[in-house]
Image (tube, helix red, strand yellow):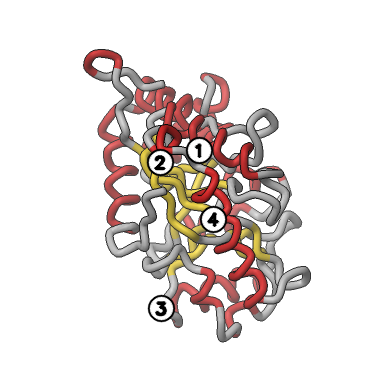
Amino acid sequence: MLPGAAGKVILEMIDFHTHILPDIDDGSHNVQESITMLKQSFAQGIDTVVLTSHFRRGEHKIGTWLRDRQDRLDWIREALTDEDRLMVPRVVLGSEVEYIPGMNNWDYLDELQIKGTGYILTEMPFIPWSDSVVKTIDDIALNSPLTPILPHIDRYFLNFTPKKYIQHYYDMDEVLIQMNAIYINNYSNIQFFKPLLEERKIHLLGSDCHSCEWRPPDLGRAIRMIREVCGQELLDEIDARGREILKNAEIITL
């Protein structure tokens, strides 16, 4: 919990990457777990959560998936008590779209954006990237109304992707970079990523939470670590960027 005056929670950050909707992907298993995860986020100072359930074209049909996503949100809203509603953040529907070749030509790609924003979380391959992967994402970024957000950039250091491709996106204004909290929530990890944070190569933060206990919401700890190691100004910039992205979003008060 981030303490404020008289012990109140300071609401000050957006979680751009979560798997809180129940029974739709490998995240929350049921409605009660989803509500607990939302409460955990709120207690850490998160005032807005983007719900980015996995969309995998090989497993999902777009119409069915969109209906399932709305149904899961409705389940949560119906289960919340009046007391619960005081302890959960606002939410925005989005997705985490698995990269596959040709996705730049999908006629429904815009339906997977963070609703009302024109930004879309695009999960890159967990094998080394190639020129064709980069060309696909570049085409979305440069020749469509959508702005890709590359989630958990921290993971791609581990899959032997050539550094030139990651650097390409660090240098590209039309693509944003999101980092997971787990990689910056302690001193040893944040020292590795501190140069990227200070050079403003990391644009957004997310917990990538999947449950209450295994990969739980933990963005609050990362926020405190960034404040301590990099300063409040950087946090303010990240928060301002997130709020600019969501200024026209379909934000839902549960």
Write down the residue under mark 1: 38
Q: Which mark is residue 89?
A: 2
Comes first in the chain, label 2 or label 1 = 1
Q: Are marks 2 and 1 in contact (CB under 8 Å)?
A: yes
Comes first in the chain, label 1 or label 3 = 1
Residue 80 point in image, percent of width and height: 49, 42
Write down the residue under mark 4: 73
| Residue at 58%, 32% in the rendered image | 182
Comes first in the chain, label 4 or label 2 = 4
Residue 180 point in image, percent of width and height: 55, 40
Where the N terminus falls, by quadrant?
top left
153 vs 231: above or below: below
Write down the residue under mark 3: 145
Residue 100 point in image, percent of width and height: 70, 71
Secondary element at tag 4: helix
User: Identity of the amino acid at label 3?
Assistant: Pro
User: Identity of the amino acid at label 2?
Assistant: Pro
Nearest to the eye among marks 4 and 2: give it.
4
